[in-house]
Image: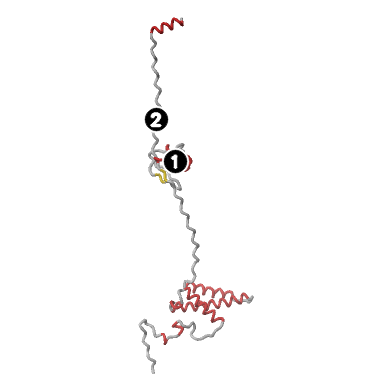
């Protein structure tokens, strides 16, 4: 008598009751293997790798198969490492070959990720730079005005200034690495007001009779 064909459910899969425990994800092996060191280690590795991939239940059948292969290879490498730690001779070529397979499986499952570089500390906010108004430079303290002139000289060594007001009127005030926001161009200083020349006093006329008297005395 032919075995009846089971209809797939609405998700396109056969009912879980007629599928293998290995297929359903409720077992890691097709048969019971008992409780021993190797089986416990295998289960630990599968759980660890599955957790890094988002959980065993969320993995596809292909991913689960690769995880089981990866756990098996890892156990084989650990056995060889234990023999080497005991001082026993091991086949280095075999060890390297198995390690290469392990790394390829890690890459296939995207389990090897470069450690993110430590975040650089946030740069401190620059100190606010003072804003100067050309029309109010005369109100600045002497030390602050001198500092401003020195900065301009360093940036424009080819045009040394003895006064901030000597900067050409048709050019913007130069900027430096920590720019100062000038609201407008510096105006040319007003021409010096010439001092009035002293007006010579008019000579007083001496009366003629007084002049004759003086000449007689001197004569």
Q: Which residue, given by chain and number where applicable, does mark 2 sit on?
A: 193
Q: Is residue 201 left or right of residue 95?
A: left
Q: Quadrant of the N terminus?
A: bottom left
- Residue 62 is situated, as x and y percent measured from the top left of the image, at 44, 78
The residue carrying pointer 1 sits among few (fewer than 14), some (14 to 19) or many (20 or more) residues within 10 Å by Cα, namely: few
Q: Residue at x 42, y 6 (%)?
A: 213
In the image shown, does 79 or 16 lie closer to the viewer?
A: 16
Q: Residue at x 57, y 75 (%)?
A: 95
- 2 or 1: mark nearer the eye: 1
Q: Is residue 116 left or right of residue 183?
A: right
For label 2, the SS is: loop
- Residue 162 is situated, as x and y percent measured from the top left of the image, at 46, 36
Q: Residue at x 40, y 18 (%)?
A: 201
The answer to whether 155 is drawn above or below residue 61 in the figure is above
Q: Which circle marks residue 140 in the picture?
A: 1
Distance CA(mark 2)–CA(mark 1): 24 Å
- Residue 158 is situated, as x and y percent measured from the top left of the image, at 46, 40
* Quarter-of-image position of residue 193: top left
Work out which residue is located at the far right of the displayed protein and give it: 87
């Amino acid at each position: 008598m032919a075995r009846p064909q089971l209809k797939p459910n609405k998700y396109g899969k056969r009912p879980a009751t007629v599928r293998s425990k290995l297929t359903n994800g409720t077992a890691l092996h097709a048969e019971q293997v008992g409780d021993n060191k190797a089986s416990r280690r295998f289960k630990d590795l599968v759980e660890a790798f599955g957790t890094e991939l988002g959980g065993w239940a969320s993995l596809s059948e292909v991913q689960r198969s690769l995880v089981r292969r990866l756990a098996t290879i890892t156990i084989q490498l650990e056995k060889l490492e234990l023999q080497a730690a005991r001082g026993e001779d091991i086949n280095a070529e075999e060890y390297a070959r198995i390690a290469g397979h392990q790394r390829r499986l890690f890459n296939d499952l995207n389990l090897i990720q470069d450690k993110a570089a430590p975040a650089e500390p946030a740069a401190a906010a620059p100190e606010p730079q003072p804003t100067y108004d050309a029309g109010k430079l005369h109100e600045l303290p002497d030390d602050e005005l001198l500092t401003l002139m020195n900065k301009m000289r360093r940036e424009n060594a080819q045009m040394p200034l003895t006064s901030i007001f000597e900067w050409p009127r048709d050019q913007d005030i130069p900027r430096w690495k920590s720019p100062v926001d000038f609201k407008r161009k510096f105006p040319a200083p007003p021409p010096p007001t010439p001092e009035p020349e002293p007006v010579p006093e008019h000579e007083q006329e001496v009366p003629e009779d007084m002049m004759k008297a003086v000449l007689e005395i001197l004569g």
